[in-house]
Image (spheres, rainbow, N blue to C red):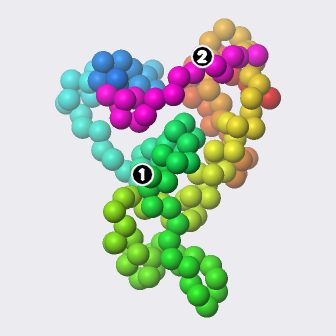
Amino acid sequence: MIDLNILIEEPTEVYHEKAKQYLSSHQLTTFMRCPYLYAKKRAGLIENVDSPVYFLGRATHTRILEGNKVYESQYAVGGPINPATGKPYGSTTKKFLEWQEVQRKPVIPFEKADMIEAMNGGPKAKQKASFARSTVIFSVKFASTGRIRNWGSSTSRLVTT
């Protein structure tokens, strides 16, 4: 079993500031795929492009690693509710877009917030882990889809129970 007390908690800003001097998880993944690409990115020859997927990943990391209080302080979660149906307006509707315009922080619609909460439940439910072989692949089973995503070396994996 892995002692999870070895993990540290730090705000996102601190983590990204340290990534200028040390390898972040994304930099490590890039290096493992292609050291030449990593070197070009590190030298500033290739710019990192933000995307909706990266935004959702940052929000998910904030929720899981920094907690609900920080998550809700940094993001506007939800949206307006349709009084006729009692359900949220879709994220492409005029009402939602009007609501989004007046928020003073990035917006996470209900459907994305539900996905983040489903992922947040996974790490809390999985407290035991054991190693198979000598190096680690980090495997995550998404509660919402049942799909498994692996990161790391293909020679071994971290098995969660």
Asked which secondary structure carries label 1, the reply is: helix
Question: Does residue 66 appear anywhere in the picture?
Answer: yes
The vertical placement of 87 against 152, above or below, is: below
Q: Farthest residue toward the right?
A: 161
Q: Give the residue number, with chain letter if any, for mark 2.
A: 6
The kind of residue tagged 2 is Ile
Image quarter in which the C terminus is found: top right
User: In the shown orientation, is residue 18 left or right of residue 146?
Assistant: left
Q: Quadrant of residue 30?
A: top left
Q: Give the residue number, with chain letter if any, for mark 1.
A: 74
Question: Who's the residue at 64% across and 46% down the image?
Answer: 119
Image location of residue 147, percent across then percent down: 69, 44
Query: Magenta region: which residues?
Result: 1-17
Q: Quadrant of residue 151?
A: top right
Image location of residue 92, percent across then percent down: 45, 75
User: In the shown orientation, is residue 128 left or right of residue 71?
Assistant: right
Between 157 and 13, which is closer to the camera in this rendering? Answer: 13
Question: Who's the residue at 48% across and 46% down the image?
Answer: 70
Inspect the magenta stretch and tell me whether residue 39 lies in it.
no
| Circle nearer the N terminus (1, 2) | 2
Image location of residue 141, percent across then percent down: 69, 39
Q: Residues within 10 Å of mark 2 (few under 14, many from 20)?
A: few
Question: Who's the residue at 70% across and 37% down the image?
Answer: 124
